Amino acid sequence: MTEADELTAAERLFDGYAGLFPPLMRAAHRACREHALLTLPERWPTIKSCLDFAKLYGVSPSELAAFFGYLGYGYNGRTVWVDALDPRVSSHAARQLATREQCIALGFQSAMLEVAQRDAWRAEAVH
């Protein structure tokens, strides 16, 4: 794959973001991520911060949380949260309980992480 092909793939990923998610969801996603980068030791949003930003922006909490690997599903009248990015959790099993919107957000997040890891590996290989 050439560098031009990779740029096209990155551009397609960005275009998909704009096409799949409405402006408020994208804004909530970016704000939640920025907040975590600036304020949390792990630099990754918690379930609570996802729920707080979803409320603030008026978007689906379960869809926003799925951007960060958290899948929520109902069980005995409560919401149970699973961290689908945790290697100890079967992501296949977690996705079986997810809504379509959660699967799309989680899938998009997985694609973004893969691109970021690939870019980091390439940058390391060059140096």
Image: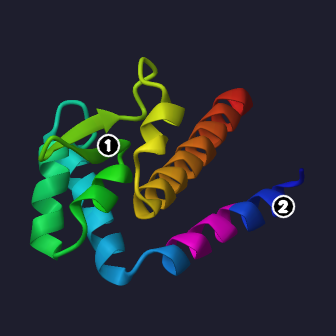
In the image, residue 7 lies at what x, y percent?
74, 63
Region in magenta: 10-17
Residue 85 part of the magenta-drawn span: no
In the image, residue 46 lies at what x, y percent?
19, 41
- Local crowd size for mark 1, using a 10 Å CA cut-off: few (<14), some (14–19), many (≥20): many
Q: Are marks 1 and 2 in contact (CB under 8 Å)?
A: no
39 in relation to 92, above or below: below
Q: How is the image coloured?
A: rainbow
| Residue underneath mark 2 | 5
Mark 2: amino acid = Asp
Indicate left or right for 49 with 18 as reference.
Answer: left
Indicate left or right for 27 with 96 as reference.
Answer: left
| Residue underneath mark 1 | 70
88 in relation to 103, above or below: above
Choose between 15 and 3: the one closer to the eye.
Answer: 15
In the image, residue 97 lies at what x, y percent?
40, 45
The answer to which image quadrant residue 125 occupies is top right
| Res 118 label | none
Indicate left or right for 67 with 50 as reference.
Answer: right
- Taking the spot 45% from the left edge, 58% from the top edge, the residue there is 105
Choose between 41 and 87: the one closer to the eye.
Answer: 87
- Taking the spot 35% from the left edge, 46% from the top edge, the residue there is 68
Mark 1 secondary-structure assignment: strand
- Taking the spot 54% from the left edge, 80% from the top edge, the residue there is 19
Mark 2 secondary-structure assignment: helix
Mark 1: amino acid = Tyr
Choose between 30 and 62: the one closer to the eye.
Answer: 62
State how far apart marks 1 and 2 are (Cα).
32 Å
Q: Main secondary structure of the magenta part?
A: helix
Residue 11 part of the magenta-drawn span: yes
Q: Which mark lies nearer to you, 1 or 2?
A: 1
Query: Which comes sooner in the sequence, label 1 or label 2?
Result: 2
